[in-house]
Amino acid sequence: MSNLTPATASFIDNLTLSDGTIRDATGRYLTEPRGRWTGQGIVLAPATTAEVAHIVKSCNDAKVGIVPYSGGTGLVGGQLMHDGPVPVVLSLERMNAIRANYPSENVLIAEAGCILADVQTAAADVNRLFPLSLASEGSARIGGLLSTNAGGVNVLRYGNARALCLGLEVVRPDGTIWHGLTRLRKDNTGYDLRDLMIGAEGTLGIITAAALKMVPQPANIGAAFMAVRSPSAALDLLAMAGAHFGDGLSAFELIHRQGVDFMSETGVDVRMPFAEQPNWSVLIDVGLPKGLSPDEALTDLFASAFAEDLVTDGVIAQSDAQRDALWAVRENIPEGNRRIGSISSHDISVPLSHIPDFIAQGMRALAEIGDFRINCFGHLGDGNLHYNVFPTAGKSRADYDHVREAVKTCVHDLCDSFGGSVSAEHGIGRLKVSDLEKYSDPVKLAMMRSVKTALDPVGIMNPGAVLR
Amino acid sequence: MSNLTPATASFIDNLTLSDGTIRDATGRYLTEPRGRWTGQGIVLAPATTAEVAHIVKSCNDAKVGIVPYSGGTGLVGGQLMHDGPVPVVLSLERMNAIRANYPSENVLIAEAGCILADVQTAAADVNRLFPLSLASEGSARIGGLLSTNAGGVNVLRYGNARALCLGLEVVRPDGTIWHGLTRLRKDNTGYDLRDLMIGAEGTLGIITAAALKMVPQPANIGAAFMAVRSPSAALDLLAMAGAHFGDGLSAFELIHRQGVDFMSETGVDVRMPFAEQPNWSVLIDVGLPKGLSPDEALTDLFASAFAEDLVTDGVIAQSDAQRDALWAVRENIPEGNRRIGSISSHDISVPLSHIPDFIAQGMRALAEIGDFRINCFGHLGDGNLHYNVFPTAGKSRADYDHVREAVKTCVHDLCDSFGGSVSAEHGIGRLKVSDLEKYSDPVKLAMMRSVKTALDPVGIMNPGAVLR
């Protein structure tokens, strides 16, 4: 980072840019969703891949850093650089075309600036599903979603963003363009550079377009809420649901009573599915073949689970509106959390079988630090929990400033002791660089550094993100 | 490659090896399935990861090349080196333990020397499925299957080998060990080095163990043969099957009459499903949720397809034995091919919608070169065809030696013109290095070379494979 020079007005003046490429460096480019840091930079929004290549090559020649900016929804500060030589903030927002759609191949080609919801719509327009789905889908863009290997609620069935991409067009740090927009399902000709670029958080090159996988829309969809006896019972229910539905199981979300109580306490308007709220419940979503009724299939699952004493109550959606209402409970949990204000939030994963122990030991370990309310919820089917720690009633986030670091370290150390990940889906950005250093295998880190140096020798790509 | 030195007896003598590590360099280590080349080398079969690391580090220090040897079933010469300084042939066959099995997580940890069929059995023993399945599963080993990102018949539903791996243990060229055997489904902490190692054909390091994904055994399995009007009708049927079954569709294999005729002609004992053999047929395999009968579901699909004039005849398996009999037709096609003896075989993929054009244009283009019989069959659902060219009746492979190169170039050029891949699932090895150079994007090649140099600076890993 130290070898870089600032982006100056004269550097920008010397670029050959299309009309509209130079943007005002307004707040949206230089802040992040939680408002915790402020970035800096000269904002450029090129209109074509060739223009991206020109800017990137010029930056490389002049040793000017580039911060790739997509939808700006990331939670780990990958999209803004708060110190160091002033970078170019490169926004792909003007490159937002669906270049082509091949429904008979279940493939569409989207530019990096496409908003996720628009890609979902483009798929729906040809009677297909683009299954990536997450809270920020109305503003997150494809380039950032791929660069962070975004997750969301359908990972259990369809995988992360990485699993939904067949090919990429990438501008390398030297300004050359890798034309890798293949629509092939199988291609074993050389190294998997696609998956290396995906999840690299813009530190190895700029994704300018992607060939994305669509899937057939499931013939029958359904959802159910089930009250489970414990996290362990939830895992047994997950295995049972796998045996019943196979990959027809689209989502399996764990919900703790605390999240529901937060919504009640802060006035988030959500209708609860149970008269008496259980401590633990799961939201199960299925997409089933033609000829199989979700209602009957979910009733059958509930009966099997009830017979084995895994569940105590259940509600099966009888209509699309009811399914939406069940999902609204899950989707509003983050809003309740936001209104309470967390002391520390964690996006962790552990091997599935360790989840009950992780939850129990986390409670005990945090109790030794202080009094907290814990809302632990999320993508149980993927072993991915959002394990968030909140003030007790009547206290605020600020009252806990002195223990925040201890809380984070406690949760992350515990996660690591179970062989878990301290960033299951959010990535490293700039916020978790030291976590990566602390918890990663040193040989993996050495390999990452070798790859970074090989592919971005000047070090212009997203300086300070992922690797110091 | 030129900077390497030969592995000598004194080099081997100076290694600290466990009993049994030094093997006789018998034929099986130095030949390949089609008997086309002969390799060379001193064969070592270490018993532990630490011993692998010691050997690799010693080779790196002495600039001795290493040819990783797994099951020896590869078809592109990745497992043997026929010229250059004598290498160490490193066989992982003694590292064949299933280290652990976690059925509640659908994960097992297999050493690289495990034979695929043994991994399938280990999964079945805990009522799970390890879905990688291919002709050589009785001898192919996990390390090689991952290093070549092997495909097979279930890719449509479960993906290639890459999609079935969560984590790796890898010995790097410098002898350090990356302990990356994670069982996590989601982990966004840094670059995707796992997928970089997978498919690298042993040129970046040695995979010594892997955390492999199992899946629930489908509640109901079934299969059908359907006679289709044309390759185009087969594609329409594929889309229809997707709409009916979603990811319940496990395999969708295209079969041409030529393959069936070859089996009859050469006495391969297979019972044909149709009284009159159609020109084109497909084998459809499904794994469906509890509560849905495969017979009824496949009958419903056939009725829909018949109504749209896509299919003319169909046979639905009424028992496991009948399902096996249908699969036997597909599985014996390569044996019929072998007995006839191909002039040139091709493992190509093209974007799905181009398949009918590719087949039609291929026929016409080859007819300009000479008289051939063409057997075009394979994994239609993945856009992956085995497009093999044979002598006319009464002639032999040797009669066509003078046109072999022209045939290969014709098929590969045509494939490339459709944006296809000239190695859909077999990899590059040493056989297709010049194809990779000819048909790949030059920027991709440059990136591959940078990565190779960064991760294997001395160039000891599988010299001459993938990259020259």
Image (spheres, coloured by chain):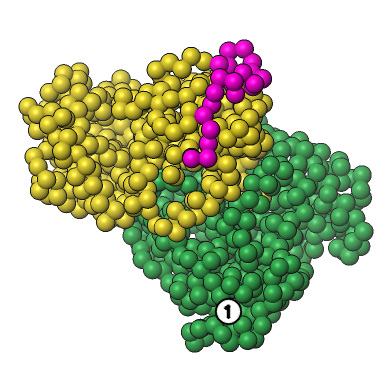
Chain colours: A green, B yellow
Under tag 1, what secondary structure?
Answer: strand
Q: Is B466 a magenta residue?
A: no
Q: Is the magenta stretch mostly helix, strand or loop?
A: loop
Would you say residue A190 is visible in this rendering? Answer: yes
At x 43%, y 15%, the residue is B26
Would you say B163 lies left or right of A456 here? left
What x and y, as percent, mark residue A38?
75, 74
What x and y, as percent, mark residue B393?
8, 29
> Quick check: A190 above or below B93?
below
At x 24%, y 40%, the residue is B387
Residue pushed farthest top? B19
Would you say residue A162 is visible in this rendering? Answer: no
- Camera-side residue: B324 or A298? B324
Q: Give the range drawn in magenta.
A: B2-22
Quadrant location of residue B94? top right
What x and y, as percent, mark residue A323?
53, 54
Looking at the rendered structure, the kind of residue marked 1 is: Leu
